[in-house]
């Protein structure tokens, strides 16, 4: 019996409600947004954790922006105007 995983086609990280803080990885219900770094509040820091599952994302920062990829929920980048 193989485990079933959520694929990027079944969950969109931009339309699903956030369950975890994207900067701390702590559940939002437990006050995960309380310890958001100052740079993140100013919009200078990319998200480090997936908002749906709380997993650490692979983040690449370049001079023109950033991309963040969750192994379960797909990618988000700084050029997307609907990002959180």
Image (cartoon, helix red, strand yellow):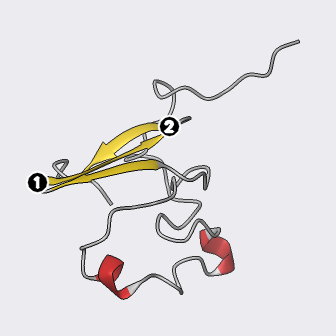
Give the quarter of the figure containing the N terminus: top right
Label 1 secondary element: loop
Residue 11 vertical position relative to residue 3 in the rendered view, above or below: below
Mark yes or no: residue 39 visible. yes
Mark yes or no: residue 82 visible. no
Residue 49 vertical position relative to residue 77 in the rendered view, above or below: below
Residue where numbered disc 1 is placed = 64
Give the quarter of the figure containing the C terminus: bottom left
Mark 2 closeness class: few <14, some 14–19, many ≥20 residues within 10 Å: many
Instruction: Name the side, left or right, on which 18 lies relative to 83.
Output: right
Location of residue 55 in the rendering, given as x and y in whole percent from the top left corner: 60, 51
Residue where numbered disc 2 is placed = 73
Q: Image point 49% across, 49% down: which residue?
A: 57
Q: Image point 46% across, 24% down: which residue?
A: 9
Instruction: Name the side, left or right, on which 40 lies relative to 53.
Output: left
**Disc 1 and disc 2: Cα gap in Å?**
23 Å
Location of residue 17 in the rendering, given as x and y in whole percent from the top left corner: 49, 55
**Callout in the foreground (1, 2):** 1
- Of the numbered discs 1 and 2, the one sitting upstream in the chain is 1
Mark 1 closeness class: few <14, some 14–19, many ≥20 residues within 10 Å: few
Q: How many marks?
A: 2
Residue toward you, 40 or 31: 40
**Residue furthest right as drawn:** 1
Instruction: Name the side, left or right, on which 22 lies relative to 52.
Output: left
Q: Image point 46% across, 60% down: which residue?
A: 48
Location of residue 4 in the rendering, given as x and y in whole percent from the top left corner: 73, 22
Q: Image point 53% across, 68% down: which residue?
A: 21
């Amino acid at each position: 019996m193989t485990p079933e995983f959520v694929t990027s086609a079944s969950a969109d990280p931009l339309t699903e409600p956030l369950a975890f803080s994207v900067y701390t990885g702590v559940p939002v219900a437990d006050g995960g947004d309380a310890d958001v770094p100052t740079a993140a509040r100013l919009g200078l820091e990319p998200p480090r954790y997936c908002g749906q599952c709380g997993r650490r994302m692979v983040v690449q920062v370049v001079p023109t922006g950033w991309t963040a990829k969750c192994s379960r929920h797909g990618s988000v980048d700084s050029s997307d105007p609907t990002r959180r």
